[in-house]
Image (cartoon, grey):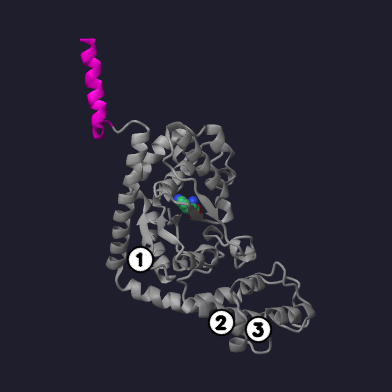
Amino acid sequence: MGKIILTGDRPTGRLHLGHYVGSLKRRVELMNSGEYEKIFIMIADAQALTDNFDNPGKIRENIIEVALDYLSCGLDPEKVNMFIQSQVAELTELTFYYMNLVTVSRLERNPTVKTEIKMRNFETSIPVGFFTYPVSQTSDITAFKATTVPVGEDQLPMLEQAREIVRKFNATYGEVLVEPEALIPENSVCCRLPGTDGKAKMSKSLGNCIYLSDTPDDIRQKVMNMYTDPNHIKVTDPGTVEGNSVFTYLDAFSKPSDFEKFCPDYANLDEMKEHYRRGGLGDVKVKKFLYNVIMQELEPIQARRKEYEKDIAGVYDILKKGTEAAKAEAAKTLAEVREAMQINYFDDEELIRSQQEKFEEKQ
Ligand code: TRP
């Protein structure tokens, strides 16, 4: 059997550079690798509602933003199947059955859930839906018999949980489900792009993101205000590149050819870093270079977005078709699950016959 990818994002906002280097760019590469038989990319609106249940408008608005970000990054609807989670009811049904295969204490031990409960001040009162979202995520993955789940490191506990549920299901009811594997970014810079303020992670709530769909002016301003080395005050001062967001971004984005094009004083990033360390290289010069490098990467993405933005009905149609195909796929797995769990009453003629015999024997 060929390899199958499933991955997704919660539609709580537009996607940013952190998403791009951490996952979107990789997805396009995986799509073009030809190694995967099927690729499903899911907009996880039902999961987003587990901690935004009182703000459905936000989720509704952001579905189209996320879809536009996917398409503009080069995900091709002919090659990947993009769909909306909540419209595939089969996923919810699977979740209900999988809930029997996991304990409350096991969910409580999930490190991602633990951190998220703290972040959301859910400690004293956790909505059950939120608490069980790892089970729902297992449904997302297994419904498509995904072998491969490209995600960030923070999702590893989710994958471990999914694998446990799969093993438990298969041991209890027979081999139906496929044990998935996580595919983590290789490059450490790509695992986590810091915020423009130098904080560990780009995050909407911290307001330190550069969005893929920001205007060039916004991006220039965000780059110019970026966190660097706080002790690098005068141009002549020696500077530190470690923990300096501008250089971390250059690690993630710049190529030697960018120097020739935008900053020919240096042959490559190492030379630029060396000068910064020595002193004599000002932040403004490095930031201008970074702006050019980022814009070069984003220009084709933004141009594609502009085209798709002209035909929003067409984008919803892509999602609708993707959702129909995803539903058909999930329904196949659900039928196998029901059969294995012996709850396929109306599809099983043998059941009716054998029950009849039982009652005849009694007569
Ligand atoms: N939890 C993921 C996130 O927050 C989104 C997601 C939902 C997902 N279901 C998934 C990712 C299944 C991979 C597989 O980013």
Asked whether 110 or 114 is in front, the reply is 110
Magenta segment, prevailing SS (helix, strand or loop): helix
Which class describes the residues within 10 Å of circle 1: few (<14), some (14-19), or many (20+)?
Answer: some
On screen, residue 350 versus residue 117, left or right, reads left
Q: Which mark is residue 57?
A: none
Residue at position x 57%, y 41% in the image: 110
Residue 9 visible, this orientation: no
User: Which three-letter amino acid code belongs to the residue tagged 3?
Assistant: Lys
Residue wearing tag 2: 292
State which tag comes first along the sequence, 2 or 1. Answer: 1
Residue wearing tag 1: 77
**Residue 37: x, y in percent?**
41, 59
Residue at position x 49%, y 54% in the image: 148
How far apart marks 1 and 3 lie (CA) works out to 40 Å
Magenta stretch: give its range: 345-363
User: Can you tell me whether the CB of the residue at mark 1 lies under 8 Å from the nearest atom of ligand 1?
Assistant: no
User: What is the quadrant of residue 34 in the picture?
Assistant: bottom left
User: Which three-letter amino acid code belongs to the residue tagged 1?
Assistant: Pro
Residue wearing tag 3: 285
User: Which three-letter amino acid code belongs to the residue tagged 2?
Assistant: Asn
State which tag comes first along the sequence, 1 or 3. Answer: 1
Q: Eyeballing the image, is 311 above or below 43? A: below
**Residue 272: x, y in percent?**
70, 81
Residue 357 magenta: yes
Q: Residue furthest top?
A: 363
User: What is the quadrant of residue 336 in the picture?
Assistant: top left
- Secondary element at tag 3: helix
Q: Eyeballing the image, is 44 above or below 260? A: above
State which tag comes first along the sequence, 2 or 3. Answer: 3
